[in-house]
Amino acid sequence: MSAVGPVARDRVAERIAERLAIFRLPTAAAEMAPRLIAAGHADALPTVLEVCELEAEERHDRRVQRLRRAARLPPGKTLATFDDTRLPPALARKLKELAQGQFVEQCLNVLAFGLPGTGKSHAACALGHALVEAGRAVFFTPTYALVQDLLAAKRDLALSRALRKLDHFDALILDDLGYVQQGPTETEVLFTLMSERYERRSMIITSNLVFSQWDQIFKNPMTTASAIDRVVHHSVILEFDVPSYRTEKAQKQKRGVTTKKAQTED
């Protein structure tokens, strides 16, 4: 190692220290490389770094497995399986950009609007899978189901504890916001959740209702305006203004059956 030169040796030593610090081994991080060098074993540093990198990779894999189980994301709904050729190019590019995960670091929300079947839920799940692969904590849930859980927690005087538990997730995916049961208690806990995460944690929200229709969810004009203000203030808005995937698929199948029947009759 010494033949490579002190600069390369110091780079390896620095990387070892960084890895050991991440492993929460501060004494080893400070002493490992300097002691090996002082003892004349600088040539062992690359091997030590290799072992550290293997440990880091194994830890990352185990963390991703834990995060994937906790996320409750629908399996298979990833960017790899998402047909972005149906989307406008700008929207497809924005999805790939969001998949890098910087929006979570900035506590931004992602709001996906579109009619049923346009791919917004798949896109939201794909972002969630990408975040999990990067080691981010994500939780996916239909909005109505989470609202019911929060209502139960409120009845048990445990709403604050339930919200703190959700606070552990870097990104909360609320699917189908428009299908929340429209009652004052439901909208109250939903608004409380949005307020708690405001400027602190990210939300990925899908909805078939545009902002002008959110009064159907929150009923009270003041609450509606406040909810919109909180989710939009720091957000990225994705508009899935495309035909329904399911409708397109059904039409193609219908055309295929019709064509096959015509050929048979011929």
Image (cartoon, helix red, strand yellow):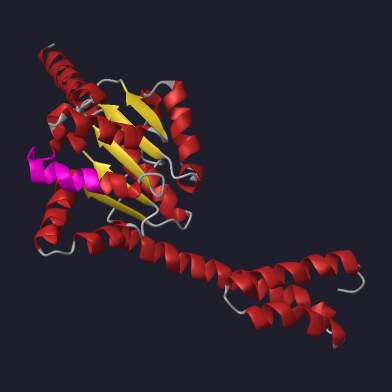
Viewer-closest of 230 and 85? 230
Displayed quadrant of residue 257: top left
> In the picture provided, is 149 more to the left or to the right than 238?
left
Asked whether residue 60 is drawn in magenta, I would say no
> In the picture provided, is 97 more to the left or to the right than 149?
right
Query: Extreme top residue here?
Result: 266
Residue 80 can be seen in this image? yes
Asked whether residue 186 is drawn in magenta, I would say yes
Which quarter of the rendering shows the C terminus?
top left
| Residue 150 pos. (x, y %) | 16, 55
| Residue 41 pos. (x, y %) | 83, 84
Magenta span of residues: 180-192
> In the picture provided, is 190 more to the left or to the right than 205?
left
Residue 4 can be seen in this image? no
Which residue is at a point 20% across and 31% down the rendered structure image?
222
* Above-or-below relation of 242 to 56: above
Dominant secondary structure (helix, strand or loop) of the stretch shown in magenta: helix
Which residue is at a point 47% across and 36% down the rendered structure image?
96
Which quarter of the rendering shows the N terminus?
bottom right
Displayed quadrant of residue 45: bottom right
Which residue is at a point 49% across and 44% down the rendered structure image?
106
Query: Extreme bottom residue here?
Result: 39
| Residue 6 pos. (x, y %) | 90, 69
